[in-house]
Image (cartoon, helix red, strand yellow):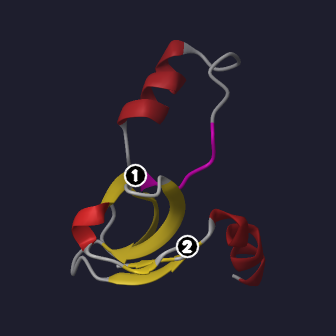
Amino acid sequence: MNCPLNGPRNISEFTCLGPVHDAVDAQSVGDAAWCHYLFYQENKAGIIREWWRHTPSNYYFIAERHTVTDEIIATYSASELPRIENKS
């Protein structure tokens, strides 16, 4: 996998941390909404954005991964996400 900070590395050096989604304020939502946010995910087939971590350097970044083929399409710094979303 290509780490945006460290370059190409063995996939065993990475940890997937789950899909990128809008944050929910735990203080302002009810218990049911908070549980839904924590435990229910769409699990769609296709390309999704996920948080990943390069474990040796503790660098967090975003990867686009195809959930059917498990292919990593792209990786980039989280700071690039607003620019990418404005283009789509």
Name the residue located 63 percent from the left edge and 40 percent from the top edge: 23
- The amino acid type of the residue labelled 1 equals Gly
Name the residue located 36 percent from the left edge and 33 percent from the top edge: 39
In the rendered image, the quadrant that contains the N terminus is bottom left
- Magenta stretch contains residue 88: no
Q: Which of 28 and 11 is in front in this view?
A: 11
Q: Residue 62 carries which label?
A: none
Q: Circle 2 — which element?
A: loop
Q: Nearer the viewer, residue 11 or 69?
A: 11
In the rendered image, the quadrant that contains the C terminus is bottom right
Name the dominant secondary structure of the magenta segment: loop
Report the Cα–Cα distance between label 2 and label 1: 20 Å
Name the residue located 37 percent from the left edge and 75 percent from the top edge: 65
Name the residue located 55 percent from the left edge and 73 percent from the top edge: 5
| Left or right position of 45 against 87 | left
In magenta, the rendered stretch is 18-23
Q: Is residue 63 visible?
A: yes
Vertical side of 15 occupied by 2: above or below: below
Q: Is residue 42 visible?
A: no
Q: In the image, residue 77 lies at what x, y percent?
A: 62, 69
Provide the residue designation for mark 1.
18
Q: Quadrant of residue 54?
A: bottom left
| Left or right position of 2 against 86 | left
Provide the residue designation for mark 2.
5
